[in-house]
Amino acid sequence: MDTTQLHNQRKISRWLAEIEEQWYPLHREIEDIVESNQEKLLKAYQAENISSHHLQGSDGYGYDDAGREALEQVYARAFGTEAALVRPQFVSGTHAITAALFGNLRPGDEIVYASGDPYETMKEVLGLVGNSPGHFGEYDIHTRVLPLTSTGHVNLEHLPDVVNEKTKWVVLQRSRGYDERPSIPIASLAQQIQYIKTRWPEVHIFIDNCYGEFVEKNEPGDIGADLIAGSLIKNPGGGLAKTGGYIAGKKRFVEQAASRLSAPGIGLEAGATGGFLNEALQGFFLAPMIVGEALKGAHFTAALLQKAGLQTSPDPFTERTDLIQSLTFTHRDAMITFCQSIQKHSPIDAYAAPIPGPLPGYEGEVIMAAGTFVQGASIELSADGPVKPPYIAYVQGGLSFAHVKIAVVHALDDMLSNFT
């Protein structure tokens, strides 16, 4: 070990000692949320009398699949909604959100994205960028985007400027996505939902719940959201679900979304589950614990990298409502080195070195470090982002706090060794 490496390791050790006292009290707060959500799930499983026969999947058309129906009832109970649609046929969170909105919109309708610019992949769906076949505009469904305030919050004062007689849904994206705006806590969502429903009782509210499940004690369904959706390879899959997504909300809206996923007249009644149910039910039960581990990792990542001089958002030890931690690097090579080191300290494909390149649904080059057991699983540790100024990488997930800590420490060591 040369002098520079030894110096860097001593710095990291000092920073670790400085933040250690801060993160242990935070861990206790996270464990309180985990316990609350775990009890909620236990009660849901008990209420639905989940049994070993519910773990067996179906084939063919998937008619009369008792396990699928029980899983969906558990989701509905856990998320505070009337009904849920939980299927392996959803290929991503974007797919689930698209089915939810398409199923509940008709030609001539408008939606308002009230939380600023949508996530990159949703912009394609909405027809805001590109010209992908089948986007909303081709069906005469139009989207208005309400810019955020100067501080990055939902601008309720100017919401009346974009809501009109054609507006059927207001959409709020809970997580920041690839953006530097703050995520929206449940308490703030509750205020926004109440304002919208009071001002426009005929307008429905959809919440993009990706990355937010089980981060807090309540879910958007508990505070009046009409429809929510997300991905099973994020929080609710608990690291076990290999594919799938969910839609939950008022029964009629879920049924209309199901007709979009399958076909009118089929709706909720079909859809083979194969080997999906065991992993989906077990993963959902484990999800509060896994989300808690990822949350601990996000706080730790922010605290350590902030000590090293990086800009972090959110700041360490602040209240969270999603799992995403952003890190702003001083230049392109530092960002790439950090992401490559996260990959190098992953359990899968550790030998691979991710490089910037095109990614479906995104503009420009993206680097994606994701040595995950499930391809693209954001509940597992990953680091990715658009490789362009201001060079922000988004660190998310982690099946265990210990793994996040080990990987991030090594990634910081590699970065310091190369650029100091």
Image: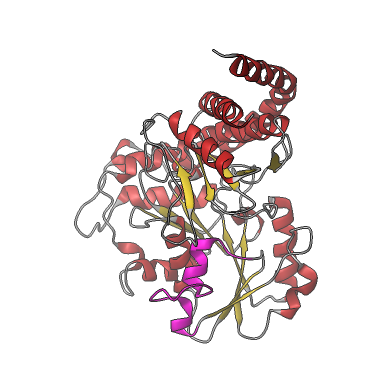
The front one of 136 and 53 is 136
Residue at image location 70% in from the left, 76% down from the top: 200
Is residue 22 shown above or below 6? below
Q: Over which residues does the magenta segment extend?
A: 117-140
User: Could you tell me how many numbered marks the image carries?
Assistant: 0
Q: Is residue 190 left or right of residue 138?
A: right
Q: Would you say residue 379 is visible in this rendering?
A: yes
Q: Position of residue 81 (x, y in %)?
A: 54, 56
Q: Position of residue 381 (x, y in %)?
A: 49, 36
Residue 269 rendering spot, x and y as whole percentages: 31, 63
Relative to 327, does residue 419 appear above or below in the rendering?
Answer: above
Q: Is residue 105 above or below residue 356?
A: below
Residue 201 placement (x, y as % from top left): 68, 75
The quadrant in which the C terminus is found is top right
Q: Is residue 124 magenta?
A: yes
Quarter placement of the N terminus: top right
Is 270 displayed left or right of 42 in the figure? left
Q: Which residue is at 74% across, 55% downward? A: 188
Q: Pick the residue in front: 156 or 297.
A: 297
Q: Is residue 203 magenta?
A: no
- Residue at 25% from the left image edge and 58% from the top image edge: 63
